[in-house]
Image (tube, rainbow, N blue to C red):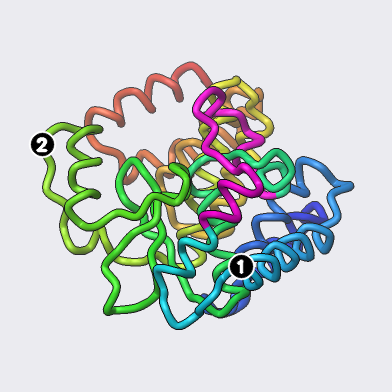
Amino acid sequence: MNLPPARQRFYEILQQPESQIDLAEAALYIAQEARPDLDVEEYLNALQTMAEEVRERVQDERYPLRILQGINRYLYEDLGFCGDEQNYYDPQNSFLDAVIDRRTGIPITLALVYLEIARRIGFGMVGVNMPGHFLIRPDRQDMEIYVDAFHRGEILFNEDCEERQRQIYGFVVLLPVQFQPIGARQFLARMLTNLKFAYWRRSAWQEALAAVERLLLLFPNTPVEWRDRGILYYRLGRTGEARHDLENYLKVASIEEAARIRALLDELE
């Protein structure tokens, strides 16, 4: 497999067992593909320094809520981290190094900063792939609370999560599975999906294609990514590759979508 250096390193990280994947390192190699001069170790060291400073501020590590309050004060009051409400779809918000430098990001990248600090002080947390919004929670069965890293570390309970969903979607009942933690590969897939969408909105087809290609390194048998890669190949004038992906996608497409894909294939002819 002939891959660019940053993508090769990303691929190598993915060969580790799920529990051993270093999320911060993998995320930094996603960013390095856009900025080849990015020093991954520099930002890993920055996260370690941040964690050490949090440890100094946490007065009693026996109390989880005090740990969360300590992280919140450090990130949002001392350093001024915040959610980017003005330019939410800026691709920079999907790059961990830029989020650390600019101290702003989207829910999943701010969650990653939060998770990495917590992990480094020995307080395990996990991501929760809530529809429409990404949250994190302590990795403990006895603590059913959630942290909204995008909104200054706001502490939420199950009822608060359901109310957030009602505000977004109207009437909704969250199922227990939607409160379950996700693994490292799913976490990275959500990051890359956000990045793909950010580039797609800007008609940055080559960059969007790079995001899709990395999504397919994570989950090769994902028909929706075959479709998107085929469309991007079409946009880039790579007709043979476009036809191959779109014909594969047709095998699993719904009737309604199949009609649109066939129309696109007719254009390729």
Question: Residue 176 appears at what percent x and percent y?
Answer: 18, 63
**Amino acid, disc 1:** Arg
Work out whether mark 1 precedes mark 2 in sequence or the reverse, and give the earlier one: 1
Give left or right: position of 226 versus 235: left
Residue name at image x 13 percent, y 42 percent: 172
Q: Residues within 10 Å of mark 2 (few under 14, many from 20)?
A: few
Check the image and name the residue furthest to the top.
267
Residue name at image x 65 percent, y 42 percent: 103
Check the image and name the residue furthest to the right.
37
- Residue 83, magenta (yes or no): yes
Between circles 1 and 2, the one closer to the viewer is 1
Which quadrant holds residue 48?
bottom right
- Secondary structure beneath label 2: loop
Q: Quadrant of the N terminus?
A: bottom right
- Asked if residue 105 is positioned above or below residue 127 in the image, the reply reads above
- Which residues are the magenta region? 72-96
**Amino acid, disc 2:** Phe
The label on residue 171 is 2
Q: Residues within 10 Å of mark 1 (few under 14, many from 20)?
A: some
Question: Residue 8 appears at what percent x and percent y?
Answer: 75, 61
Question: Which residue position is annotated with label 1?
Answer: 57
Residue name at image x 55 percent, y 51 percent: 215
- Secondary structure beneath label 1: helix
Give left or right: position of 54 versus 170: right
- Residue 7, magenta (yes or no): no
Q: Label 1 to label 2, Cα distance in Å?
A: 41 Å
Residue name at image x 66 percent, y 49 percent: 96
Check the image and name the residue furthest to the bottom.
62
Which quadrant holds residue 144?
bottom left
- Asked if residue 68 is positioned above or below residue 269 in the image, the reply reads below
The residue lying toward the viewer, choosing from 176 and 190, is 176
